Amino acid sequence: MKTAFISVTDNGARLAADTAANLTCKLDLYAKAGREGGTEATTYESLSELVAEIYQKYNGLVFIMATGIVVRVIAPHIRDKRYDPAVVVMDEGGRHAISLLAGHLGGANELTHVVAKAAGAAPVITTATDIQQKPAPDVLAARIGLEIEPFDQLKRINAALVAGKRVVFFIDCSLPNYEHYVSLAAEQCIMLVTADDLVHTDRYDAAVVISDKELYMVKPHIFLRPATMAVGVGCRRGVSSAELFTAITDACRKIGRSVKSVGSVATTAVKDDEIGLLAMVEQMAVPFKTYSNEQLLHCIEKFGLETSAFVEEQIGVGNVCEASALLAAGTDKLLLGKTIYDKISVAIAEVKSPSLA
């Protein structure tokens, strides 16, 4: 976690330096200009201007100052718990470290414990699931690297946990490397039940389901989506990001999968400057991979993929979407072969070894 320590007083600067010396994570120190903290910190004149500049540049921000100051200075920049950095506040006496923002998904609760231990402070955690020692799905998602869907139901599931409802965590056993997910969940003291038991709705009040599939659910639920698919795309010049996203979403639905489980989008290097594609992968927040004609041709020949004379005439290779999907997934099997939409072709392959946290 790339972390910044920010102080406003001499004592705060000294505490930041002493605490940082006990940490191994990548971090930077910022101290108010004119302070004598005895550190090699970067100095700043205006706290509000500094925060505006660095708010999205770090995974974690540790402020050594009054909580009220921090609340006011970060308020204009707060977006969403999925995207905000972890924010921790510590008093300059080093007595308490407070998890202020993005406790679960941003990792502020965990950072608070780390900082508190390094400074000899008492950690202050206020999230209800932590106070009641309940297994929070957003913590599990963050630890394993899963997407929450639908995100707006997370509050409802966490409320059910806090209220003592029967919230059961399920896993789709057909997932690649599902045993690893089971092991990682066990480290968080969460037992995963096979998704086959979802049919027994009398045994749970709400469900947390690790799966890349679109499943019909009766009870309140959220899905935790692993990145199990690589999508290969071919398109004509000028196609919009909305058209591309609609095509990919529909392609995923054709095989009963969630678009939230797309781990990467791939295409030919000829399209590496295609504005619509670049905007779409930024919207989806997934890696964008491009392959040379030589790489695509080798894949086409290796797996005997069908080619299009028109496409070959346009870009020099006759199959883009299927070949790029297979290359990105590192596999030899397509979940969905070339599927044509207006100005777009899509293919999907299952990632051989999904990245695991």
Image (cartoon, helix red, strand yellow):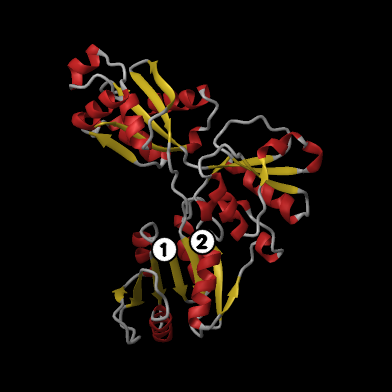
For label 1, the residue is: 1
Pick the front one: 94 or 25:
25
Side of 288 where 188 appears, left or right: right
Q: In this view, does 328 lie above or below 143?
A: above
> Which label sits on residue 122?
none
Categorize mark 2 by other alpha carbons within 10 Å: few (<14), some (14-19), many (20+). Answer: many
Image coordinates of residue 311 in percent, x first then y, are 24, 17
Categorize mark 1 by other alpha carbons within 10 Å: few (<14), some (14-19), many (20+). Answer: some
Image coordinates of residue 194 in percent, x first then y, are 67, 41
Question: Which secondary structure lies at badge 1?
Answer: loop
Q: Which residue is drawn at 39% across and 25% down?
A: 347
Between discs 2 and 1, the one toward the N terminus: 1
Pick the front one: 74 or 223:
223
Q: Can residue 277 be seen in this view?
A: yes
Mark 2: amino acid: Gly
For label 2, the residue is: 107
Q: Toward which corner of the image does residue 187 lie, by quadrant?
A: bottom right
Q: Can residue 68 be seen in this view?
A: no
Q: Which residue is drawn at 27% across and 16% down?
A: 307
Q: Which residue is drawn at 60% across and 54% down?
A: 185
For the view shown, which residue lies furthest in the top direction? 309
Image coordinates of residue 350 in percent, x first then y, are 44, 34
Mark 1: amino acid: Met
Question: Which secondary structure lies at badge 2?
Answer: loop
Q: Do the residues labelled 2 and 1 touch (CB within 8 Å)?
A: yes
Image coordinates of residue 107 in percent, x first then y, are 51, 61
Work out how far the residue at label 2 is from the one at label 1, CA to CA, in angstroms.
Answer: 9 Å
Q: Residue at x 77, y 43 (%)?
A: 205
